[in-house]
Image (spheres, coloured by chain):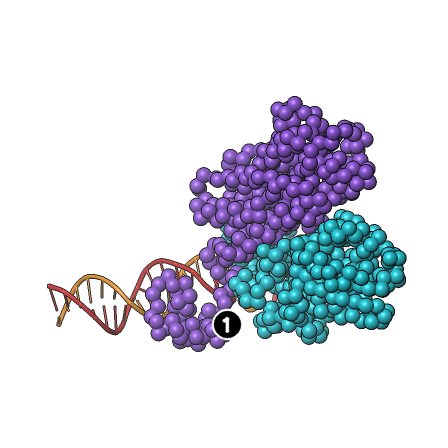
Chain colours: A purple, B cyan, C orange, D red
Amino acid sequence: MNIGEIARRAGVSRSTVSYALSGKRTVSEETRRRIQAVIDELDYRPNAAARALKEGRTRTLGLVIPPASLRLTDMQLGFVASVVEAAARADLDVLLSPSGGDHDRSFERVVSGRRVDGVILMEIRLEDERVTRLQQTGLPFVTIGHTAHPHGTCWVDLDYAALIARCVHHLADLGHRRLALINRSTELVAAGYGPAQRALAGFTEAVTQRGLTGVDLCCADDAPSGETCFEQLRADHPEVTAIATINEAALPGIQRAAERAGLAIPADLSIAGVAARHWAEDFRPPLTAADVPTEMGAHAVDLLLERIATPDSPPRHLLLTPPISLRSSTGPAPTR
Amino acid sequence: MNIGEIARRAGVSRSTVSYALSGKRTVSEETRRRIQAVIDELDYRPNAAARALKEGRTRTLGLVIPPASLRLTDMQLGFVASVVEAAARADLDVLLSPSGGDHDRSFERVVSGRRVDGVILMEIRLEDERVTRLQQTGLPFVTIGHTAHPHGTCWVDLDYAALIARCVHHLADLGHRRLALINRSTELVAAGYGPAQRALAGFTEAVTQRGLTGVDLCCADDAPSGETCFEQLRADHPEVTAIATINEAALPGIQRAAERAGLAIPADLSIAGVAARHWAEDFRPPLTAADVPTEMGAHAVDLLLERIATPDSPPRHLLLTPPISLRSSTGPAPTR
DNA sequence: TCGGTTCGACGAATCGGTTCGACAGGACGA
DNA sequence: TCGTCCTGTCGAACCGATTCGTCGAACCGA
């Protein structure tokens, strides 16, 4: 059932059916009704590929996610969910591309086969080949997170430096003098992953400003690494009484190791971080954390649609600094 | 840069370029090289829409997920991840359609706009309009979970009845005599959600078989509901010493409420369930559970590809019964 | 009655690929 | 030497929509 079949049955030309559907030219009420009746009867829907070919747009957004093998964090999942939901609201579909390596087939298919009208990129590195590639293709895109050269691109991001600094100040206010930052993996830091670098910068600056001593550690994004990381921390710096972290995946491990070491949270050890709200609430004890706004993905979609509509407008950015929600994982420093 | 441009620069016809690319007819080595050189230089990639239009297939799979507003469980996230990964391995893209209601635009776009070659459906109900809709369109599809009429369709599912029965037997072996099943939400059960119904059936049968007393409760898929649900359970049936559940989202709440009631796990209360492995391991204490196989999504993709290739073959099913991994959330019944 | 609008519909071109039929020219066997 | 087969290439049709130019009929005022 194509448009020709509809036209035949309604006794009109194909163009008339098209105009009846799009409303771009007037069609008499009588004709329109006849066409609509046939369409309803046959349950006709225009072929998306044909339309995309002619119109030059696909009504589809690409979403580049970390490779599926890596478990998505709750925060990342929240991005994906809100992107998909916002896209659905705008009657757009979302094409998923798992791509962590800088040069994989799925990513190439999506960007260079003109399969999508625009792309949203997650897990951005400070120097990111995918961003470079997108720039050279001219495909509109928005990143969640930003690169070292943020002015030329559209993005929405969390101000990790400010967020971690707030955690430090909060902990300092509670009397903690020796803090640790548990960052994300060594590889990510080495690869120039922005949040990791900025978290470190924010931590260092706040610690200095408050005259505290701070140590920072890298830790892979999973619970077992969290355990070994915490054990390492205890061995090297037993004096630490508070932890700030952006590594939500490692937290269950950190907590497990703390428990094994006989440390109660928050009596002996305070923990503050950055995490999705649900996740922070489900944590035991509920985690004091900057709650990542659920609508970040929606912001990204808005920015992208704007960019698709007016590709030459100056790129816009959104740097979010959600407030810290005080829960039960932080408390006064132990009096020793 | 379209195929005509490549042809012009290489001094051949468009069809020759197409054949050089697809290999469906012989092209002389000399010509092929010239064409390839031009393609490499211009970084040409065939337009996906044009190809889809002509070939009648889109090299894209549709994945229908629960609406984004509901937080995906770790198990569901595992399905999505493994579907996406398996599809990428087969050089297919995945189009996401969030659709919980039975009649929404995103779902209709995907199934009736011929945007995908096949569909994978999650969160199936015993009577599911989406399945009916797909059957009438004739689009190949596979469900993760199955309906009340499972013979006509392709699916892969967990044998919840057997899984919950195993949990019951395990708990009975540990000496527990009074058990509770914490199921999923009342609405889901009322709507005929298969896993919920089958879990209940398996629970009831195993409890009867072992001569135990069992109570079953419904609980919405979130931690706060888990808390109130457990409080209700304690109020109505304080004698219960063990819980079996398929509601992983409610578990943090259940555990929180148990803790507040002064119950230690597993000393005073044992819990066994069905959950993603990572999730069970990160739980405190680590959860004795049937580990949902990570490759379920991959199985679904395999079945779907088979179905797309031979639409008239008899539908195949896969009913998985992963073993229970013993961890620390179950123990001997308290001697009272 | 005639020229100028407006309305409603049609036909043809187009988007960018794939594929079928045709065909030129060389190799080969009879 | 002729017919046949094979190889490599081309031209044209086609997939299913959108859109531009055109055109007849009705209508209007002069």
State whether residue B32 appears in this view.
no
Q: Which residue is mark 1?
A: A43
Residue neighbourhood size for the residue with mark 1, other residues' Cα within 10 Å, grouped as few (<14), some (14–19), many (≥20): few
Tell me which amino acid carries mark 1: Asp
Front in this rendered view, residue C12 or A112: A112
Q: Quadrant of residue B37?
A: top right
Q: Position of residue B97 (x, y in %)?
A: 58, 59
Front in this rendered view, residue B88 or B185: B185
Seen in the picture, residue A192 relative to B177 is either above or below; the reply is: above
Q: Relative to A270, is B94 on the left or the right?
A: left
Q: Chain of mark 1?
A: A
State whether residue A210 appears in this view.
yes
The residue lying at 60 percent from left, 68 percent from top is: B130
Q: Position of residue A125 (x, y in %)?
A: 62, 38
Q: Quadrant of residue B173?
A: bottom right
Badge 1 element: loop
The residue lying at 74 percent from left, 29 percent from top is: A335
The residue lying at 64 percent from left, 72 percent from top is: B127
Front in this rendered view, residue A51 or A89: A89
Q: Position of residue B81 (x, y in %)?
A: 68, 53
